[in-house]
């Protein structure tokens, strides 16, 4: 696993669990508002790529905190791109951790295999846009059909999971209604408030700085959306 960053303790990222978060390097998406741009490249020696955390130090940390931390969140970048993700989740389980996967949903077969082997306890999958706007918002490599397949897999699984949408500039109330139609019935749907990233491409400046809905607007949109979807909407501003 190429782990490029870590939060050692959090109560916010894994519902009901005191956890650490590991950020894997590499992602094939290119969301214009990405906050993890410095870790999007996989190669250690690429310009701008973050150096990996030393594996030995990481394992010592995980083994020392076993029994103290309840969960480990594996986030990214896109963790499902890592070749040894199954082995790594198996290692986390062997230490007694509950595991959470944060994914953009681009590799449904990896989600399926982690679920089949009982290696993941909670999954958060991004549903970033209406399908017809996926590549506009997430870059040319974004594949909405893969995300849709990931939703289907999770909808028929017995583990807890949620869908997440960052309500970024240019995403309208109508777009959110369309996303609602893409989700399986009754899903827990988390709306994350937009925060401007520190690093972004020049050509995206217009949409980085464009207005995103205020907390009051988001609250109204959520109330309206709740009338037409069976999803349970939860939104956070922090
Ligand atoms: S999927 Fe996540 S890590 Fe990848 S570009 Fe989008 S926001 Fe960044």
Image (cartoon, rainbow, N blue to C red):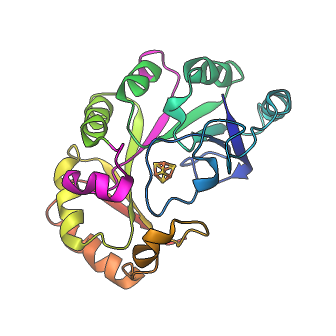
Q: What segment carries the magenta color?
A: 115-142
Image quarter in which the C terminus is found? bottom right
Percent across and percent down for residue 88 are: 63, 22
5, above or below 118, in the image = below
Viewed as shown, does residue 161 lie left or right of 147? right
| Residue drawn at point x = 24 percent, y = 64 percent | 176
| Residue drawn at point x = 52 percent, y = 71 percent | 195
Q: Is residue 13 visible?
A: yes
Image quarter in which the N terminus is found? top right
Query: Residue 125 or 95: which is nearer the viewer?
Result: 125
Q: Specify the quadrant of the image occupied by residue 157.
A: top left
45, above or below 177, in the image = above
Percent across and percent down for residue 180 are: 21, 56
Q: Specify the quadrant of the image occupied by residue 197.
A: bottom right
Viewed as shown, does residue 143 lie left or right of 41? left
Residue 29 covered by magenta stretch: no
Query: Residue 140 or 34: which is nearer the viewer?
Result: 140
Percent across and percent down for residue 185 are: 20, 45
81, above or below 127, in the image = above
| Residue drawn at point x = 29 percent, y = 35 percent | 146
């Amino acid at each position: 696993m190429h782990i490029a960053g870590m939060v050692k303790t959090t109560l916010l990222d894994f519902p009901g669990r005191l956890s650490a978060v590991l950020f894997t390097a590499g992602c094939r998406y290119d969301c214009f508002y990405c906050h993890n741009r410095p870790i999007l490249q996989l190669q250690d020696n690429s310009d701008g790529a973050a150096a990996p955390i030393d594996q030995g130090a990481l394992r010592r940390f995980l083994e020392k905190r076993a029994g103290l931390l309840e969960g480990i969140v594996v986030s990214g970048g896109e963790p499902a791109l890592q070749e040894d993700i199954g082995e790594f989740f198996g290692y986390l389980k062997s230490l007694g951790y509950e595991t959470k996967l944060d994914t953009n949903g681009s590799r449904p077969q990896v989600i399926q295999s982690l679920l089949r082997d009982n290696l993941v306890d909670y999954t958060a999958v991004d549903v970033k846009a209406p399908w017809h706007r996926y590549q506009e918002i997430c870059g040319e490599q974004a594949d909405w059909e893969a995300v849709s397949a990931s939703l289907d897999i999770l909808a028929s699984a017995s583990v807890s999971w949620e869908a997440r949408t960052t309500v970024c500039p240019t995403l309208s109330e109508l777009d959110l209604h369309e996303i609602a139609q893409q989700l399986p019935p009754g899903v827990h749907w988390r709306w994350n408030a937009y925060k401007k990233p520190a690093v972004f491409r020049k050509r995206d400046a217009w949409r980085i700085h464009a207005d995103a809905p205020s907390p009051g607007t988001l609250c109204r949109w959520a109330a309206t959306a709740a009338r037409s979807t069976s999803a349970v909407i939860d939104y956070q501003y922090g």
